[in-house]
Every structure is written in structure tokens, then in C-alpha cells.
Image (spheres, grey):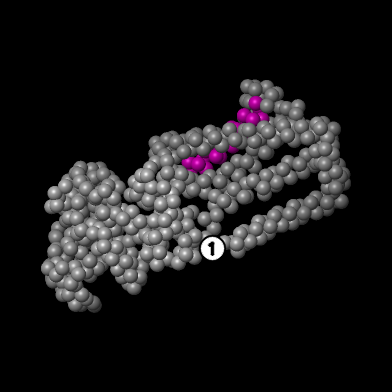
Amino acid sequence: MPHNTPLLRVDVAEHRYHPLKQTLAACQFAVQRGEIVSLIGPSGCGKSTLLRVAADLIEATSGAVVCHASTKAVLFQEPRLLPWKDLLANIGFGLKGVKGLSPRKRQTRSLDIAQKLGFNSDDYSKLPHELSGGMKQRAALGRALALAPELLFLDEPFSALDIGRRRALYRLLLSEVDSQLTTMLLITHDISEALALSDRILVMAPEPGRIVKVYQPDIPREKRDRQAVSAMEDDFMSDPMMHQLFELENWQQLQ
Amino acid sequence: MELKKLIELQGRLWAGWRTLSVVCMLIALWQIGFELFGTLILPEPLAAFNRAIIFLGDNAGYAYTLATLKRAVVGFLLASFAGIALGLCAGWSNTLSLLCRPVITVSLGVPPIAWIVLAMLWFGARDGTPIFTVFIATAPIIFAGTLQGVRMRDVDLDEMAKSYRIGWLTSFWHVQLPQIVAYLFPAWATAFGVSWKVVVMAELLSSSVGIGAGLSEARVNIDSEATMAWIAIIVGLLLLIEGLVLNPIKDKVEGWKHAA
């Protein structure tokens, strides 16, 4: 495969859940190897649908997705752990889809990941209902990372957590992503989060869902600090289209 | 881990104790009834229990109990196989699950006694009549439980399994089955209780062997002591099976549902 072929190319002509309602209009984008791309947009604009199409969980009514990644994983909004399996079995569950991996190897790999994610050995045999919300999402992250995926899809996985926990999980994720050169497509509704993390931001508008803007920050990812992000946010939000999209006239004022 | 097991054991002992105390209270009420109304209406509990022990010790009585047990279990197992297999098929298909709803209503609506008459015409006085009646009375309950379990499963978990490219069989076994069983189990336990009632009813009308036949003999002889003795045997067996078979299975398959 030539180096400049994108790892993922999404070319949706349209998607309808219901024949009379167009959920997605034409959406095209490509994600290069090692790139982090964010999808943002108001609630109900079809971000999750587009992500599902890209992750091959659903097929677009019309359109094509070409993916060259050998392994991929999806982190959903909810942890989606199996309530009847303990933490370690849940982390290892995704590995069941890998052909030719013995249960023993699966076990070792889940243990590795669990340690890396900072779980105590007392937690290993706990069922999901015995874990806190943050721990559950951390376990779901473990389940995804256990596969060492080339391509990772994130559907606002940490949005239910407080800011500290969320940042900790992102840091964990990013250290993993950078060391493995993982490619990421993530949905977030937090604009500063998107600006801090991504190489490229796709902005979506609703009814029907479509990509209306592509924003590429000038500062490389590793050089961004809080100040830079806040400057980027000002620049990003100065576009009147953004105000309209998020219904944010007078966005500088709170009242 | 040890502590968890100990707590489990304590829970089981406590449940057994609870059942035992309720049974003792019922026997006490029975004793009061006997003292108020006399032997013809309600025999003395002790005498009835003695009679039950004699029944079980005696060859014919033992054979009666065994015959009933066999018929109930065979009918129930056949109903379980058919009900679960059809319930799974119907649950996975939208069309079938819609079509099945009236079928369930109709089959649950036909009283077991009507089935007994039909079964007597078809199978005569052989084992077939009670077995068929048990089957037809319990299969719709098991079918409905399975169907419900499949329909009510969390599709998000299916999607999660799909995202990891988990194979169909693994996904069924690890993702769907635990949820289906959790729904099915209460229906299954109910069906088991129903199978006991129905088997005795069918035997009473159609057989010369079995607890139902024993009850029929007791009725002819106006022997209230024998009647209560048979009832004690039925209820005792049901309690034993529930405590030794159904409840342990239930703890195993539903353990994860009892959040701390």
C-alpha cells in the first residue's frame, strides 16, 4: 500500500433509517494513518450515524467505505460491558474476535492491559455493577486497547465523566495512541477538547447530516497548551456559521 | 472469595429456613382446621403424613409417584426443547414474533382440561395423555418467555460484539444467551409448577397409575386422609425440586442481576 493512501475513506452518498427521512446527505472524508480527526456538531446532526457507517457497524443506504486497517475498535458512549462477566473477562472479550488466539494468551493480554490502565488486582474479579462509572469506561477503553487497534472510533466515550477523570482517560488514551501510531476518529461535543486533541476537525450540520466545514489547526498537536487552545477556540468560533449552527448568537456573553 | 462463598451459603440456609417456617405455619393452620371441622373435612396432619410415608414405602404407591414424576418431567422437557427452539426462531425474526402473538394468546387461552379431553381421544389411557397435556400446557409459557428474552435483549451489546467481529456462535453464547436465560428462567419455573398441576389433573381423569389415579381412588373411597397424603407428596416433591434444582440454577444464571 503506498504511503499516501488514506487508512479510511468514507464516501457516503446518503443514508436513511426511514425511507422518508434523509439522515445523512453526501459526506466525504478520508483519514490518514496516525491522524486524529474529530467530528463535531449540534446534537442529532448524524455524527453517531456517520461514525457507525465509517466503523462498518451499519451500511449506508448508498455509498462506500474503504478501510485498510487490519484491526479496529469502537468505544461507545456507554461502556457496554457484559454485566455477567468480571472485569478481566470484559477486557478480554474483544480478543475473542481475533482468530487463533488461545484463551491463555487472551488472559495474559487482558492482565497486561488491566495493569497498564491502573486497575488493582482486587478489581479483576469484580462484575461491572461493582465498578464506578469511570472504572467502567476505563474497562471499555481497555477492551478496545487490548486489540492494539490500528484504527479507533470514539463516540463521546467519556462525556458522562467529570473533567478530571475525562482528562485522565484522554491522557491514557493518547499515550497509547502515540506509542502505537493509532489512527482515531472521534465524536465530541466539547469544542476545546476537539481543538486540543485533533489534527483535523470536521463540523457537521443537521437535517440532513452533512459536513459543512473542515478546520485544520496551524499548531501541531504536541505544541498545544491551554493558551494556544483558547486562542484556537476564539479563531474557530469567530466564524458566524458556527454561531448559527450551535445557536450561539452573542456567544461571548453568558447572559 | 472465601467470604463471598460463606455469604452465599448463609443466604441459601436462610432461604431454606424461610421455606421451612412457612410450611410449618401452613401445617399449623391445617391442624387448626382439623380440630375445628373434624376428620371428614380435613384429616389430622400427622395421620396424613403417616399415610404418605406408607404410600412411599409401599411398592404401588412408590410406582405411582415415580410414574407421575416421569410424565411431568418428560412432558416438561419436551415442552422446553420445543418452546425454546421456536421462541429463539420467532424472537430473531420481526415478522414471526408479530405473527406468534395471537398464537400464544390462543394456546394459553385453551383450558388444560379441554386439552385433556382431546388427548384422551388421541392417546387413550396410556402415558401419552398426561405427557401431551403437560407439553401443550407448558410449551406456550416457555415459548413466550424465550421470545420475550430475545426481544428484550440489549441490542447495544450485540452492536458491541459486532464491532469486535465476534463470531455468531460466540456472540450468541456470551452476549445473548445470559440475557435470554434471565428472562426465560421465571417462565420456566412457572411452567414447571404448572406441569405438576396438569399432570395430576390428566391422571385423575385418564390413568390407572400415578398420583392422580391415587387421588381418584381416594375420592371413590371418600378417603380424605389419603387425599391429603397425596397432596403432601406432590407439594413435598415440588418443594424439594425447587430447593435442590431450580433455585441453585437460578442463583447461577441470575447472580449477576442481583446488584450489590
What type is the residue that disc 1 sits on?
A: Ala
Callout 1 secondary element: loop
- Residue B156 location, x and y as percent? 38, 51
**Picture residue at 26% right of the left edge, 48% below the top:** A70
Relative to B120, B258 lies left or right: left
- Residue B190 location, x and y as percent? 60, 44
**Picture residue at 82% right of the left edge, 45% below the top:** B49
Question: On the image, which quarter does residue B113 sit in?
Answer: top right
Q: Indicate whether residue B212 is drawn in magenta.
A: no
Relative to B130, B171 lies left or right: left
Q: Indicate whether residue B129 is drawn in magenta.
A: yes
- Residue B58 location, x and y as percent? 83, 35
Is residue A191 in view from this perspective? no
**Picture residue at 71% right of the left edge, 34% below the top:** B68
Question: On the image, which quarter does residue A155 sit in?
Answer: bottom left
Relative to A32, B21 lies left or right: right
Residue B167 against residue A8 in the figure, above or below = above
To which residue does mark 1 refer?
B260
* Of residues A215 and A249, the one drawn nearer to the viewer in this rendering: A215
Relative to B61, A34 lies left or right: left
Residue B75 against residue A46 in the figure, above or below = above
Q: Mark 1 packing: few (<14 Cα in 10 Å), some, or many (20+)? A: few
- Residue A208 location, x and y as percent? 20, 52
- Find the magenta span and give its range: B128-149
Query: Which chain contains the residue that carries disc 1?
Result: B
* Of residues A132 and B237, the one drawn nearer to the viewer in this rendering: A132
Q: Quadrant of the C terminus of chain A?
A: bottom left
